[in-house]
Image: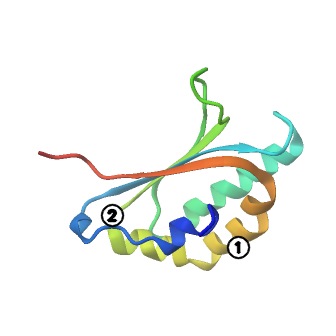
Amino acid sequence: MDQWTCSQALRLPTIIGKQVIRHTVMFTPKHQPGSAEERALLSAARELAKISTVRRFEVLRQISPKCNHRFGLSMEFDDEQSYHSYNEHADHAAFVNDRWKLEVESWQEIDYVVYDE
């Protein structure tokens, strides 16, 4: 399984149930910093916020010298079903295939739920 398909192929543990899921991805575009191409990619990413199950969508600029990625995306989903619907949504699939796979140099995806013990 390659990096491009792992998030769609993996299932969240059933223990998650109805917890809010925070989906984040740090990434570095292939484009020159500040270029029109970079801005176009970030603008296209913002369109993901229109998918009905997405909550609290943000495009973030990474500022720490401890991380090599330049940007981040963050969004929340009400539950596992909402997250699955997003992953399967035609607009998300089109963004991944038409933009992300072609224009992103490196990335790391992290999904969170609140740790409660």
Residue 82 left/right relative to 89: left
Question: Disc 1 marks which residue?
Answer: 94
Q: Quadrant of residue 66?
A: top right
Residue furthest to the front in view is 1
Q: Quadrant of residue 97?
A: bottom right
Q: Residues within 10 Å of mark 2 (few under 14, many from 20)?
A: some
Residue furthest to the top in view is 65
Up-down relation of residue 41 to residue 16 (above or below)? above
| The N terminus - image quarter | bottom right
x, y percentage for residue 116? 16, 46
Residue 20 left/right relative to 38: left
Amino acid, disc 2: Asp
Residue at screen point 62% across, 61% down: 3
Residue furthest to the left in view is 117
Amino acid, disc 1: Ala
Callout 1: SS: helix
Residue at screen point 44% across, 74% down: 84
Question: Disc 2 marks which residue?
Answer: 78
Residue at screen point 68% across, 66% down: 96
Distance in Å between CA atoms under marks 2 and 1:
23 Å
| The C terminus - image quarter | top left
Q: Quick check: marks 2 and 1 in contact, CB under 8 Å?
A: no
Q: Residues within 10 Å of mark 1 (few under 14, many from 20)?
A: few
Residue at screen point 65% across, 61% down: 47
Check the image and tell me how it is coloured.
rainbow
x, y percentage for residue 14? 25, 71
x, y percentage for residue 80? 34, 70
- Label 2 vs label 1, nearer the camera: 1
Up-down relation of residue 20 to residue 10 (above or below)? above
Mark 2 or 1 closer to N-term? 2
Report the number of discs: 2
